[in-house]
Image (cartoon, rainbow, N blue to C red):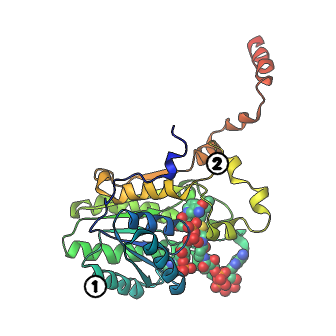
């Protein structure tokens, strides 16, 4: 494999010319990386979240680098009327929206019994309610206008395994996975494709501050949990998202693509812990086994 080819752009130049893509949570982290790449490929990108100053700064930074306009729109995705306003702002500016990337999220680690009901609500309202709010508002608009479109939902691998200590996030991401698969079937007749990406560990300030506070980042080194022994690079996630948003993936619908270097399977396979056994010990083990 060429040295770190995954850090390079994958789609052809101008693949998104004339397209408009909305990225929720597009001001930071993975949302910002995807937005930058969509903009590089020629898209009109709308980035949206609660903090307008951060969005404006990111929009300026991306436009400065790509030469294409990025529209920052303030919107709390947990509030349906704000989502409708955000959609209207995008349509007013660009005439239509072609794709929606539901990336906004909230999360922090905690034993579940320490959470108040409000703490539980706050995560579910961002992740699950925020995703269905955006999907519903955009979907109604596309169906009414008889417009083909694509949705990409950013989930996690614990959407199907579940995970302790991030339970509000896990139940929400599981709901988003169900939404992805349900609408992939129901809305295919309108030319709307719905897919998801399940990233493994991709270092971002937002996630690392809340999931690996203090010295947890050293103690709980994600690299060791990944068979490929590295964390993800933002561009490789952006490449995958661009592919799913684009018509190159026109026959992919209802799929969730995991991009985690094999992390969740390493945790799942019952005998994968045998990885810890040194090579020369296998001779002894084999001799013992053959005797039986
Ligand atoms: C227990 C806590 C708590 C904690 C907050 N609460 N922190 N309870 N343990 N550590 C409680 C509060 O007491 C309050 O409940 C309720 O949660 C809401 O608290 P607020 O102060 O209103 O919210 P705040 O803590 O300021 O913000 C929470 C948040 C914030 C909204 C989720 O962190 C945020 O804006 N996050 C957005 C970005 C983000 O989270 N990114 C990470 C995505 S990473 P009471 O009852 O006291 O009112 C991701 C990756 C997954 O999803 C996979 C990685 C490998
Ligand atoms: P991040 O930078 O913290 O991104 C979260 C974004 O969501 C922020 O830009 C935040 O902006 C926005 N947001 C939060 N609440 C919102 C609300 N109510 N309305 C609108 N926007 C809101 O973290 P990240 O790591 O890039 O995460 C991006 C996505 O990847 C998330 O879906 C996360 O679950 C997923 N993911 C990440 C990893 C990883 O390793 N990083 C792994 C698996 C999955 P404001 O604060 O301005 O609102």
Vertically, is 193 above or below 25? above
Mark 1 residue CB less than 8 A from any atom of ligand 2: no
Compared to residue 173, the image places residue 251 above or below, namely above
Some atom of ligand 2 lies within 8 Å of the CB belonging to the residue at label 2: no
Residue 44 point in image, percent of width and height? 34, 72
**Quarter containing ligand 1?**
bottom right
Q: Secondary structure at mark 2?
A: loop
Q: CA distance from mark 1 to mark 2?
A: 43 Å
- State left or right for residue 131 relative to residue 113: left
Give the mark nearer the N terminus: 1 vs 2.
1
The residue shown at (62%, 42%) is: 228
Number of other residues with Cα within 10 Å of mark 2, as a class: few under 14, some 14 to 19, many 20 or more: some
Q: Residue at x 76, y 22 (%)?
A: 282
Counting from the top left corner in percent of width and height, residue 154 is at 48, 63
Residue 251 spot, x, y in % from top left? 29, 50
Checking the image for residue 230, the label placed there is 2
- Residue highlighted by disc 1: 92
Location of the C terminus by quadrant is top right
In this image, 260 relative to 137: left or right?
A: right
Q: Is residue 276 above or below residue 263?
A: above
């Amino acid at each position: 494999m060429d040295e770190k080819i995954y850090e390079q752009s994958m789609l052809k130049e101008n693949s998104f010319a004339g397209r408009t893509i909305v990225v929720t949570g597009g001001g930071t982290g993975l949302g910002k990386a995807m937005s930058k790449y969509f903009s590089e490929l020629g898209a009109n990108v709308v980035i949206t979240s609660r903090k307008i100053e951060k969005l404006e700064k990111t929009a300026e930074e991306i436009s400065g680098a790509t030469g294409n306009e990025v529209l920052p729109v303030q919107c709390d995705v947990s509030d349906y009327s704000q989502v409708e306003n955000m959609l209207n702002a995008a349509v007013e500016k660009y005439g239509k929206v072609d794709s929606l990337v539901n990336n906004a999220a909230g999360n922090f680690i905690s034993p579940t019994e320490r959470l108040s009901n409000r703490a539980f609500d706050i995560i579910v309202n961002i992740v699950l309610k925020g995703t269905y709010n955006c999907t519903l508002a955009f979907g109604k608009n596309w169906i009414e206008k008889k417009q083909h479109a694509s949705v990409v939902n950013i989930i996690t691998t614990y959407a199907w395994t579940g995970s302790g200590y991030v339970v509000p996030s896990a139940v929400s991401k599981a709901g988003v996975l169900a939404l992805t698969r349900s609408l992939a079937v129901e809305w295919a007749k309108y030319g709307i494709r719905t897919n998801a990406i399940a990233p493994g560990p991709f270092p971002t300030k937002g996630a690392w501050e809340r999931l690996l506070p203090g010295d947890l980042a050293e103690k709980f080194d994600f690299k060791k949990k990944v068979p490929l022994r590295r964390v993800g690079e933002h561009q490789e996630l952006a490449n995958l998202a661009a592919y799913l948003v684009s018509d190159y993936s026109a026959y992919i619908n209802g799929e969730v693509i995991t991009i985690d270097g094999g992390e969740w399977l390493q945790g799942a396979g019952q005998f994968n812990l045998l990885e810890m056994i040194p090579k020369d010990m296998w001779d002894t083990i084999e001799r013992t086994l053959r005797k039986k």
